[in-house]
Structures are given as structure tokens and as C-alpha cells.
Amino acid sequence: MLICTFGAMFRPPQIAIEAYNYELPNDRIAFTPTDDRAGSKLLVWDQAIIAESHYANIAEYLPNNAQLFFNNSKVIAARLLFEKPSQENNASIIEIFCLEPAKQFTPVVLAMQAKQCVEWYCLVGGAKKWKEAFLYKELQFGDKKIIFKAQKIKQEEGQFLIRFLWDDNSISFSEILHIIGKIPLPPYIQRAANQEDVDRYQTTYAIEEGSVAAPTAGLHFSKEVFKSLAEKNIASNFITLHVGAGTFMPVKSDTIDEHIMHAEFIEVHKDEIVRIIEIKNSKTPKPIVSVGTTTLRTLESLYWLGVKKYKELKGADFLKKAELGEALSLGQWEAYELDEFEVSVEVAFNTLLKWMEYNQTEKLFAKTQLMVTPGYHFKICDALVTNFHQPKSTLLLIIAAIVKEQWKEIYQHALDNEYRFLSYGDGSLFWINKMH
């Protein structure tokens, strides 16, 4: 049941999460990748299941004027293991899992480029064993050694603020992660990451370091797939959302309005915002196909960020000194409240461009908590390429927002026909708006 009103009386959608539960047998979960990226199966849905194929053939199911958008965030080696001698001289392990940088080290690129000191919010495995002021690790960089330290600053809601320090101002935090970090596989994969994971739990086009989980729909796009898209004149565009650990977590509350969506960082270059305006203003329909739920949330968030800023500044001088350096952010339910304002894509995105011009930046940095549930009105995306998701997850709610109750039929079909589920698994192409 969905209860949703707007304006001063707005209430978040009260959806029983149990309605989005299903039985996922262990033998349907992909614990390892396929032999080749494009070998995974692809189910195509357009008001009904209309085709079943493989990602290698995805270009066949896209019109030649389609505009694909990809999330080019790169998974960082976010798991850091510190060996701590115990009183019995037996080593014990404390694991620090970096989730997101502290505010003074955002956007994420600042944290990755930090020298000598950086602070991150982290999960800590074995926190009760950590009694010392610092954990130490000696690292070898070429012909020199450095001391890398971790210090607990405070604990907040199950997370720890950790300060990392090292005694060499020529080495970045990114370089340290490359040396000692481990790839953070999803928690349901109960094995250590191997060399194959280092390659395959990363898209071929990943550039911007910052994710702690892969934008998994993109894992299927090999160089050969990109070649087949280009041969059909299907455009590939790239934006960034740094995927947080909270994105893939099942909802534990009874109703979705009680769930707190994890905020994530987005980065979008001015050229891509201009490109979206051009696509939407084109006399020839050019469907925007989002590769992955993270890309969809980024594109949709951009629209609502523009609407929010337009609403704030309408009727007043657009440029105010108070605006300088102000961080853009979108709350979990703000899109549903803003939906009452009839703002075109062009106006919303031009507002972002004006804000960027005023702040003298070529790249927009923002945070989004946007939660897409049944009843959401899509503003930018016309199709979604995505994997099969966990029961009772916010990602499954995105699918239900597109296909309504048919998600049950689609997922049952996938289970009955031995599709592989979750991050390394098979996927689907869902059409949202009939532009093709």
C-alpha cells in the first residue's frame, strides 16, 4: 500500500517491505564471474518479456539513436587488515573497511589524493580487541619504508571515524590502498578476493576512484560490446556515483519509510549536463538508457537537484555570495516533495549550469540519498540495464517502480530458467518510457 501526499502534508511512501521478498536459493547466486564479461544472460522487458539473449548481443535490442550512460566510478581496495600481536604472541587481525571520507576530505577525490593524513568513516572488525592508541603497519614503497598508522577518533551509529597517518608527504592515500588494500567483495561471497576478482569486480571503463562496491550492471560490458554499440552509432556517456556499502543492504525495517538510505557522492562534468539537455531537446527521440541503478539514481538526482535549486532561487537574485561553495545535496524523499513543481528538464539542468558557472567549477559535486520506490515519476531515464537483486532491497524497489507488480513474474521466470543472481550474475534490460 502506498500513501503519498505532497506539500506540507507530505508523508514518505509507506510500503511494506515484506511485499518485496522472494526465496533466493543459494544455487541461483553467482559467487564467481562468467568466463567472459559479455557471456551473462540478458532478459529484455518491454511491458512483457520480449526476448532472452546475452549481453554480447545487447546492441540488437537498442535503437541506433539510444544514449547509454555508465557509472565510471572505480572500486577502491577498501579493506585494510592490521595484524595485532596478542599477549599469547598469537597474531590477531583487525579489519578496517573504509566507507566514506569525513566531510573535510570530500569530494572523494580529495581523500584519495590526501598526503600524510586522511579521515574516513569505517566499519571495524575486531574493534573490541583494539585497545591501543594506534595500529601500525610497515609498508615498502620502492627502496623506502614508511609507517602507516590508524587511530580511532570516535564512534557514531556503528561506524568509527578513523584517522590514517603516514610519514611520507610524497605518497597519496590512493597509493597506500593499492599496496595494502583488499577488494571488498559483497558480504554474501564468503571467500577471499583473488586475482580474478581484482579484474572482474571492476568495470572496463572505471576511472574515478571512490566506490566500495561495484556498479555491477557495467561488469558485463566488454570492449567487444562497446565496439558493437559504436558500430550501431549508439552513444556511450559517463558520469560518476561512488557506490557506498549501504546501497546493496536489505531493508530491515517493516516499511520503507523507516529505512535510512545511505547518502552517496556524485560527480558529473558540465559537458554531460549540457549533453542531457541536448538529448532531451532533440527533435528525434533519443532514449536515455541507464546502465545500472547507480547511474539511474545519479541521472534522476541531477534533475531534482536542479529543481531544488530553482525553487530556492526563483523570484530572487540568482547569484548570492552565500551560495559560493555551498554543497548540493538531495534528501531521501525530497524528489517526491518537489514533484509538485512543474519544472522542465532544460530549466532544471540550466539551473545547475548557472550554479556551476557562479561557483567557477567544471564538475558538479553533490550527495544524494534519492530512494526510488513504486510511485516514483521518472524524469530522465527511459530504460535501465541491471542485474537481478536481493530480496527486500532498495534496488528491487527500483525494479518495481518500473514494472510494478510484474517484478514477481519476471524474477520467478529468471529463477525457473536458471538465471544467475546478484553482482556477478545475469541481468535485464527494462524499458521505462516507450520512446523507442
Image (cartoon, helix red, strand yellow):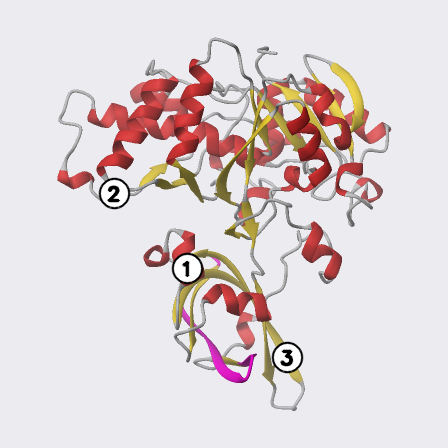
Q: Which sits in the foreground, 279 or 348?
A: 279
The residues tagged by marks 2 and 3 sit, at their Cα atoms, a distance apart of: 44 Å
Lower position in the chain sequence, tag 2 or tag 3: 3
- Image quadrant of residue 126? bottom right
Residue bearing mark 1:
111
Q: Residues within 10 Å of mark 2 (few under 14, many from 20)?
A: few
Kindly indicate the quadrant of the structure image that contains residue 322. top left
Quadrant in which the C terminus appears: top right
Q: Residue 70: say if magenta.
A: no
- Image quadrant assignment for residue 340: top left
Residue, disc 2:
326
Residue on which the image places disc 3: 92
Q: Amino acid at mark 1?
A: Ala
Residue 142 falls within the magenta-colored stretch: yes
Q: Write the start and end of the magenta stretch as one range.
A: 138-158
Q: Secondary structure at mark 1?
A: helix
Residue at left offset 76%, top offset 37%: 38
Can residue 95 be seen from the camera position used here? no
Say which residue appears at 81% left-offset and 31% top-offset. 415
- Res 434 seen here: yes
